Amino acid sequence: MSPRDAVAARPDRPAPPPRPRRTGPVPVALLLPATLGLLFLVLPLAGLLIRTPWSTLPQRLTEPGVLTALRLSVQAATLATLLCLVLGVPLAWLLARVDFPGRRLVRALVTVPLVLPPVVGGVALLLVFGRRGIVGGWLDSTFGLTLPFTTTGVVLAEAFVAMPFLVIAVEGALRGADVRYEEAAATLGAGRWTTFTHVTLPLVAPGIAAGAVLCWARALGEFGATITFAGNFPGRTQTMPLAVYLALETDLEAAIVLSLVLLTVSVVILVSLRDRWLSSP
Amino acid sequence: MTADPSVPGADPRPAGAVLDAHLVVDRGTFRLDLPLTIGPGEVVALLGPNGAGKTTALRALAGLIPLTDGHLSIEGRHLDDPARRLWTPTEQRPIGVVFQDYLLFPHLTALDNIAFGPRRQGLDRHRARQRAADWLARVGLAEHARRKPRHLSGGQAQRVALARALAVEPALLLLDEPLAALDARTRLDTRAQLQHHLAGHCGATLLVTHDPIDAVVLADRLVIIENGQVVQEGDVATVTARPRTDYVARLVGLNLYRGHADGHRVLLTDGFHLVTGDQHAGDVFVAFAPSAVALHPGRPDGSPRNTWPATITGIQRHGDNLRVQLGGPVTVAADITPAAAAQLNLAPGRTLWAAVKAAETRVYPAAAAPADVAAEP
């Protein structure tokens, strides 16, 4: 008997009773498409692993091009996430706690980048922040600040695409948090700002962390908006996904190695969030 | 407990009241209409059945919901007056609140929970913690300063919540069912401690509760509301001796009837006559304790002036005795000893004779006496 069994067999801690469930054979009409669907999702990933040049992997990973792209990706995704936190958490608070006219519209607008093709997002960013754009032109003439085709542009493009993930996650956490704690803070003399910083934020910290990780993962994988708004300059705007795409045409093995790195990051994120997102009841 | 040791023989509504309010809150079909005045050092219990508007009143006082009408001032400072478009946000009110489930901030230690209020009042971190430590010691939890709320027992959490509310030195302390979440044993200890701390609080205290024992032990004055309206108000002795509604009668454990008196006889609304010790005329209440009701297997002879056949509808334990619910010409509750119960062979459906001595009844006028019931809305 393993220690695990011993715990399970302890009389004072009975296992939860199994839920009543319909038994009988699973219909083929459901089983077949389900199996095909699973294969369709898993096979490409397996293919990636099978084709990985494991013997040369260490050299490949330490090639300067790979490292440069990886470092740029991590830096840009992290900065984008910070930007999303600074702007997105207050936005989520506004949506969750303040009853203002047009709140539904604002919430819909916030989620637009979620469904918008990223390329379109990139074009839109160019039109506004480009050197001849509404804001970009002014930034250029006033501060001499150019955003498109720079690393800052990468950060902006990633933040644009990834922010909805953070806002939605944090708003959900705020709605789930007990507002009576905020009332208790008010009775102790805390205004709304102090209540937000001293009570609300600590209470929803796990939700914010989860939202930030999700946001970071989305930013790391961003392709369409980045290549449109920031271009594809190695060392400056060429992030991992862009490097994968470029390598695909010249050096298949390099593309596979870069893809493997991104896959690993995804799996790590999935595992780190599994308790929060994957433990279905 | 006296109203205020510094004002001997104080009027129940002293001129320098800490809280002077008339709370009117409309919520759909429900309307709370509650005039409320509390003097310095006075503890008022707001009692009522579920849905009577107790919590609404507390939230209105705390500024967590707005008044529809009326006014609210604390220590002469006008905080709420919808007619003059005056409203003060919760954080600017001189109040302290102990919530029903305490709402201690889960991410802060017991000490920092208590220091939270003083910090907001502008004390620096060190002095706020000093004051918090002081309060923690007063509630006897000095050694639990660094514990998080989830590591505190129910009674300890209650005391931390009380210390947190008192640490801001509120003019008005609001307690929302402060003992409801505790088990019977802890409740007894905690109630005694709460009584001690309330006696030391020189501001006004409003205790919202549905537990008559909490109210009787902790409060100087009771305000009883039903359906958002005050049905009875007065000191503990008066209210417990002279209930004016069925709810209050049940609360204080008395049989209560309304009727019309003519000398020693009172004609109840359902046509039954009771003979009473005192003489009265006009609309009256008649009250007597369940222990005043004697049960006999057959029609009793002798002194009792009120006897009637009654059918047992229910039997419950009540302390050391049994409380027997009886139907018949009048419904009545009787307390009898287990020994008597054994002799009587009690069982629901069995018919007995109930007897009440005239001298055991209490008769008082039904017309609202000014001291008993608050002003009409």
Image: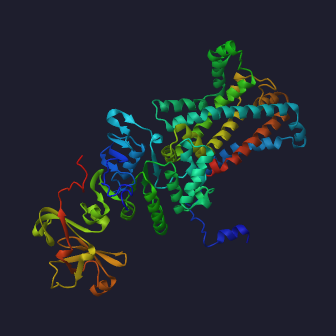
Residue A85: image x %, image y %? Answer: 64, 35
Q: In this view, does A255 lie to the left or right of B123?
A: right
Residue shown at the point (70%, 20%) measured from the top left: A147
Q: In which quarter of the image is the C terminus of chain A?
A: bottom right
User: Which of the pair B257/A88 is nearer the observer?
Assistant: B257
Observer-nearest of B192 and B130? B130
List x then y, in percent, for residue A179: 50, 45
| In this picture, residue A64 sits left or right of residue B139 | right
Q: Dividing the picture into quarters, in which one does residue A233 lie?
A: top right
Tell me which colouring the rendered structure shows: rainbow
Residue B162 point in image, percent of width and height = 50, 55
**Left or right position of A43 against B351:** right
Q: Is residue B234 above or below residue A217?
A: below
Indicate whether B54 appears above or below A157: below
Q: In terms of depth relative to the viewer, which is nearer, A98 or B368?
A: B368
The quarter of the picture where residue B70 lies is: top left
Residue B333: tell me if it is visible.
Answer: yes
Q: Point out the residue furthest to the left here.
A: B262
Above or below, comparing residue A137 to residue A75 in the picture: above
Residue at 71% in and 17% down: A145
Count of numbered badges drawn on the protein: 0
Q: Quadrant of the N terminus of chain A?
A: bottom right
Determine whether B210 is above or below B78 in the image.
below
Residue A224 visible in the current orientation = no
Residue B145 placement (x, y as % from top left):
61, 57
In the image, B247: left or right of B299? right
